[in-house]
């Protein structure tokens, strides 16, 4: 049995456990490979199009390969007025990619996100869901170089 | 001088939120004990008498909601909405991080009232660390909760899942698209079974209502929306933090006394209460109480309790444009008025913000707003045009400045 099958099998008895299974697969692969969709559809008794529909509905799930570190910049209003645009530009400059892209070495993916509920310390970014507070363009090089 | 009134957050940072033992030491789980000695009908009446209303945004009477659940059905569910995706809001995270056990106790109290032994907490995907904390808290509370089970399910980043039927769809493992109502979840919810969906803060109020009595709770704050409210302050305010206040505190007290006023010595321009779907309120309404009905009377909403402050230097049209992008992105696409409406709202605002719009665009936006409020399937689409409408109403001059 392949790794994907093994992971999905752990959730097979969980009613409505598709999203949980997807989370577990993403923990391993950082995205949902094609076989994950097929396997989930089979296990939970839904069509592949339905399984794909779930995978593409939620912004934290991705059917495209992503980097080791997924950086998300919050672009909701509180972060917006605190200078999120400048932070995005600084990250794009530093990594040489645009929002939605992954660096050639497969290390970083840059995404935008809506509010992550840490508005006491705006602007906020997350690295693999870990929030980093009060980010400024000046702090960006230091934050990124800490990610090995 | 306005003061905080800490009920839910009284023991914040003094107890370990994951530990039932810590919580019991400060009186925890005695509310559940008391509730379980009552018959469900009396318990629901007690909650009704407390006048507790939903803390998630809709402000519906909690006891009334529970009373819609039919008695003679074997399987029912208690669902907690911890999907707080409303930008600028983090009060449910704070309640969990400071007093997670009160949430669990509240859910078990609801379980006894409606005759359910299974609860689900739907936590947003942005809070994996809260999921972890809650799972520990549930393990620790297994004795206290007895036959009532609670499972935590994690969302995956979809604002619309804060709508109760979309949330239910998501727990079932589907795309988080809202259902048509009726039937309401109280009759047909999770896996077609009767289901109560309440917000974290609503459940967390229940232990204190049980211990101190419905009359006590009904006497705190404003009469029509009693109790305390946890607010999260963001934007251009000195103290960007959370506060728990009685519901008769005014916006001015919250912003200028607790919040410490505007940052960098600037002047106040506007406040948006209740999250990104709320109305922008100018200075003349700052003496309004924060309770649900008082906010409603000025065309605003208490909503989630987010308080987003803008100083005099902020460009209202730019902020409204940014917000319109949010709603376009988060619209699930199920109903046409929202899918198309959020798109057009953003399109016209972007045009105006770029200085390429006309005064006629303002009328188009107001008409669109009316249509969306009436025709959209769920609260997302109905509230999406509110920031646009309220900023045109109160800050029309700022729009006109950018009009050709």
Image (tube, coloured by chain):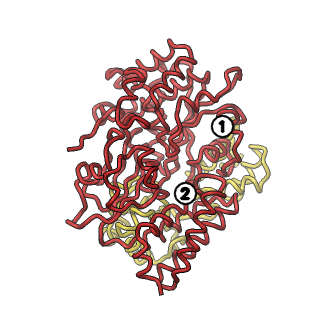
Chain colours: A yellow, B red
User: Foreground: A142 or B321?
Assistant: B321
Q: Earlier in the sequence, mark 2 or mark 1?
A: 1
Q: Is residue B41 above or below residue B53?
A: above
Rendered position, A67 above or below B13? below
Give the left or right position of residue A106, taking residue B7 as reference. right
Q: Is residue A85 visible?
A: yes
Whether labels 2 and 1 belong to a single chain: the reply is yes
In the image, what residue occupies the spot 56% across and 24% down?
B111
Q: Is residue A107 visible?
A: no
In this view, the residue farthest toward the bottom is B404
Residue A141 figure quarter: bottom left
Up-down relation of residue B258 to residue A71 (above or below)? above
Circle 2 chain: B
Q: Quadrant of residue B100?
A: top left
Q: Which mark is residue B383?
A: 2
Name the residue rendered at 41%, 25% in the picture.
Answer: B209
Circle 2 or circle 1, nearest the eye: 2
Q: Nearer the viewer, residue B8 or B212?
A: B212
Q: In the image, residue B395 lies at what x, y percent?
A: 41, 70
Give the x, y percent position of residue B194.
67, 31
Q: Is residue A102 toward the left or the right of residue B292 in the image?
A: right
CB atoms of marks 2 and 1 within 8 Å: no
Which label was assigned to residue B19?
none
Q: Which residue is mark 1?
A: B185
Q: Residue at x 30, y 32 (%)?
A: B10
Look at the numbered disc 1 and give the secondary structure of its residue. Answer: loop
Position of the N terminus of chain B by quadrant? top left
Q: CA distance from mark 2 to mark 1?
A: 21 Å
Q: Position of residue B225 (x, y in %)?
A: 43, 37
């Amino acid at each position: 049995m392949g790794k994907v099958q093994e992971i999905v099998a752990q959730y097979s008895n969980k009613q409505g456990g598709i999203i949980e299974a997807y989370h577990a697969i993403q923990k391993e692969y950082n995205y949902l490979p094609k076989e994950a969709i097929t396997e989930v559809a089979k296990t939970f008794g839904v069509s592949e199009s339905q399984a794909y529909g779930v995978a593409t509905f939620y912004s934290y799930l991705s059917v495209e390969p992503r980097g080791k570190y997924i950086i998300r910049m919050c672009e909701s209003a509180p972060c917006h007025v605190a200078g999120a645009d400048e932070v995005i530009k600084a990250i794009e400059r530093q990594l040489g990619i645009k929002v939605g892209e992954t660096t050639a070495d497969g290390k970083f993916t840059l995404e935008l996100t809506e509010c992550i509920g840490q508005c006491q310390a705006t602007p906020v970014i997350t690295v693999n869901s870990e929030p980093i507070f009060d980010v400024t363009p000046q702090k960006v090089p230091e934050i990124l170089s800490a990610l090995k | 001088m306005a003061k905080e009134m800490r009920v839910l957050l009284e023991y914040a940072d003094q107890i370990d939120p994951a530990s039932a033992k810590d919580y019991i030491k400060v009186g925890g789980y005695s509310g559940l004990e008391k509730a379980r000695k009552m018959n469900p009908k009396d318990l629901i009446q007690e909650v009704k008498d407390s006048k507790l209303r939903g803390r998630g945004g809709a402000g519906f009477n909690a006891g009334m909601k529970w009373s819609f659940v039919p008695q003679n059905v074997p399987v029912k569910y208690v669902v907690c909405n911890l999907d707080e995706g409303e930008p600028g809001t983090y009060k449910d995270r704070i309640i969990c991080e400071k007093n997670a056990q009160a949430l669990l106790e509240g859910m078990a109290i609801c379980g006894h009232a409606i005759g359910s032994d299974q609860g689900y907490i739907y936590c947003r995907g942005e809070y994996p660390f809260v999921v972890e904390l809650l799972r520990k808290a549930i393990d620790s509370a297994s004795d206290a909760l007895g036959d009532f089970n609670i499972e935590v399910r994690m969302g995956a980043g979809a604002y619309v899942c804060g709508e109760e039927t979309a949330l239910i769809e998501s727990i079932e493992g589907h795309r988080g698209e809202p259902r048509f109502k009726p039937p309401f979840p109280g009759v047909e919810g999770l896996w077609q079974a009767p289901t109560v969906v309440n917000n974290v803060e609503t459940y967390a109020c229940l232990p204190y209502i049980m211990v101190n009595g419905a009359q006590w709770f009904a006497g705190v704050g404003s009469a029509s929306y009693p109790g305390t409210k946890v607010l999260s302050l963001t934007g251009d305010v000195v103290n960007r933090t959370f506060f728990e206040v009685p519901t008769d505190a005014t916006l001015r007290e919250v912003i200028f006394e607790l919040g410490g006023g505007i940052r960098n010595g600037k002047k106040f321009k506007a406040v948006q209460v209740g999250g990104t779907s709320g109305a922008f309120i100018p200075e003349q309404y700052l003496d309004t109480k924060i309770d649900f009905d008082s906010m409603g009377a000025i065309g605003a909403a208490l909503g989630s309790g987010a308080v987003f402050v803008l100083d005099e230097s902020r460009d209202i049209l730019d902020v409204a444009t940014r917000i319109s992008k949010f709603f376009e992105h988060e619209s699930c696409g199920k109903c046409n008025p929202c899918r198309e409406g959020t798109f057009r709202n953003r399109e016209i605002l972007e045009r105006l913000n770029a200085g390429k719009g006309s005064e006629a665009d303002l009328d188009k936006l107001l008409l669109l707003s009316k249509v969306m409020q009436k025709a959209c399937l769920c609260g997302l689409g109905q509230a999406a045009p509110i920031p646009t409408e309220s900023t045109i109403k109160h800050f029309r001059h700022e729009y006109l400045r950018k009009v050709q």
